[in-house]
Image: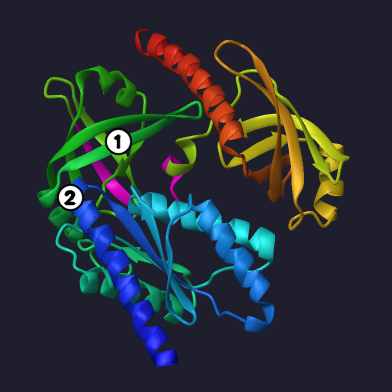
Amino acid sequence: MKNRDTKINSYLNRGVVEANLKFAKEQKSIFSIIKFGYEVDLDDAYTFKDLVAFIHKFTDFSPILQEDSDSFVLFLKDTKIHQAKAMINKMNHKIYNLFDFEIKNIGITVNNIGDTYKKIMDRVDKYFVMSKLSSRKKVFYGTVDFDYYDTMQPLKVLKNIFSKNSEISLNNIYKGIPITEKARVNGFSDGIMQVGIKADKIPFYQNEKFTFVQHDGVPDIIKADILKIDKSEFIIVLGNLQFLQSSPIERSSARIEPTKKIHTLLVLEHKKLVEGSITSISEGSISFEIPTSQTENMARRDLFHKELTIKFQLANEKKILSTLALKAYIFSIVNNQVIVNISPNATQKSKIRDYISSQQNELLSALKLELKR
């Protein structure tokens, strides 16, 4: 019976994977596939049930398949490998807050137009095995073209990638908001990248020392120094490339620093813990400043694994205030800055997006005036 159940599960998994591959090819879309390990203890089956429920909800109800007794496969539709890695890291931190353990073995890859069931599963399994064998890193990832951990000469790999697909995005940050431009790599040699840009963005790059480069075929964000700007040909020359283990672009894409003071209150079981002022906000986390006199008291209390509530008010573009009360878990307390991860529902997330949008519009207007000077 067990062998029959295993075979049924194997065919079920293959059907789901092949359906995702077919859909991606027909729609010319992308998805990331993640393989992770979790040793199921049937004596504590409810923890496993709650873990799966959390992962399913956190990933917007993405499919989860059982590969064998202790490994599982997760699909993230319309998710590039940069986004998948950022999401999994954030998910793992929340799992630690909720369940007091981490998923230690994780492999990630993204679909390719030439993928078959065997090819994509072999690739994600390779990264999963590398993660299991490693004593240093928990998440291993890569694409058909870019095997980050095996590649000893990443600049040569970049040349191959840019020759196949020259489209990139250049990303910078202005007062907490992302400034993004689609561009093309005109040439790449010996670590020097020549990029064609739009004429109206030249004044902005003249004010910057570096930029962040993102490409669909590269797992990491690349930080590059701006070496030269050719105003007549609309070209910038980039060099001193660095592959970043964490992505400031992914974090900044939905984060804003309030232009006006926002009072906030952190609550545990209906009792006030501390009051402060929000310094930055995104759909997934909030940082706020508390009185220095309260910092030591907050750090001393055992709050890191407890469900808290954070309360504050946000204004939309019409200046209408909404009161929000969100579930929160403390991520860090450094000096007098507290950072909490939040889990807003659809309505609350919409209100946060409206606020971020209104703040971005104000800052972009200020940026345009500054560039005209």
Q: Is any part of residue 147 visible from this angle?
A: no
**Disc 2 packing (10 Å; few <14; some 14–19; many ≥20):** few
State the residue position of label 1: 170
Q: Is residue 216 left or right of residue 283?
A: left
Amino acid type at circle 2 is Glu
Is the C terminus in the top left, top right, bottom left or bottom right quadrant?
A: top left
Look at 48% across and 82% down and name the residue there: 69
Which secondary structure, mark 2?
Answer: helix
Q: Which residues are magenta?
A: 236-249
Q: Is residue 17 left or right of residue 47?
A: left
Marking on residue 26 = 2
Q: Quadrant of residue 231?
A: top left
Q: What whole-number distance in Å separates the C-alpha atoms at marks 1 and 2?
A: 29 Å
Q: Is residue 196 above or below residue 242?
A: above
Question: Is 198 or 194 nearer to us in this picture?
Answer: 198
Residue 271 covered by magenta stretch: no
Look at 64% across and 38% down and name the residue there: 286
Is the N terminus in the top left, top right, bottom left or bottom right quadrant?
A: bottom left
